[in-house]
Amino acid sequence: MNRLHRRLLALAATFAFALPALAALKPGDAAPDFKAKAYLAGKPFTFDLAQARTKGPVVVYFFPAAHTPGCNLEAHLFSEAIEKFKAQGATVIGLSAGNIDQLADFSRETEHCGGRFAVAADPGAQIAKRYDATLAMKPGWSNRTSYVVSTDGRIVAAYSDLDPKQHVQHMLDAVAATKATPRK
């Protein structure tokens, strides 16, 4: 693929991803449980949300496609903050419907996930549809939407913005708020 072709594809992707979407699941809503083929440091396993939330809150973040500029940055930011999430007992899982054949590499590459958290494949954006986290212009792909799911299976926080820079901080704040809220 030549440089011009890559630039045209990047420009087309920018326009396709330009429509913002709001996360439809709101705090208090039931989070759909799911199982998905996932990778941690390149090693495959099955991620099970119901099982993961028995250990603490789970950050479920949807991203459009591995090895794209915004998704690379977002994964890197989550990787840099993973110890902060772990210190609060939270698990992070990234899900994508785009470039799912590249997720094993994406999960281990230092400049992305760095083997510090798992990413899962969402063929056809089936899980993203249940979370109403699909791109308006490309419904078969995930939108950039993040959720915190509590141990009781409820949405604690939702954040949707195609700019990847604020997702980590919003999710860290939400996880911290779950620790500050007394359980009933």
Image: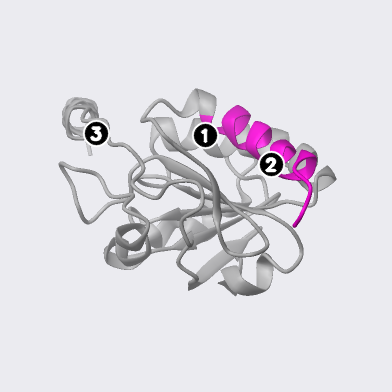
The residue shown at (52%, 34%) is 74
Q: Which residue is mark 2?
A: 175
The residue shown at (75%, 57%) is 184
Position of 154 with respect to 1 (left or right) is right
Q: Which residue is mark 3?
A: 17
SS state under label 3: loop
Q: Amino acid at mark 1?
A: Glu
Provide the residue span drawn in magenta.
Answer: 167-184
Instruction: Give the mark nearest the N terminus, 2 or 3.
Output: 3
- Which residue lies most toward the right here? 87
Instruction: Give the mark nearest the N terminus, 1 or 2.
Output: 1
Q: Is residue 168 magenta?
A: yes
The scheme the figure's colours follow is one colour
Position of 14 with respect to 51 (left or right) is left
Position of 15 with respect to 114 (left or right) is left
Q: Position of residue 4 (x, y in %)?
A: 18, 25
Of residues 88 and 63, the one drawn nearer to the viewer in this rendering: 88
Tag of residue 108? none
What secondary structure is the stretch in magenta mostly built from?
Answer: helix
Q: Position of residue 35 (x, y in %)?
A: 50, 74
Q: Amino acid at mark 2?
A: Val
Q: Which residue is mark 1?
A: 74
The residue shown at (39%, 40%) is 144
Q: Amino acid at mark 3?
A: Phe
Tell me if mark 3 has few (under 14), some (14-19) or many (20+) residues whose alpha carbon lies within 10 angstroms of its own.
Answer: some
Q: Position of residue 3 (x, y in %)?
A: 24, 27
Tally the marks: 3
Q: Position of residue 55 (x, y in %)?
A: 76, 64
- Residue 89 visible from this viewpoint: yes
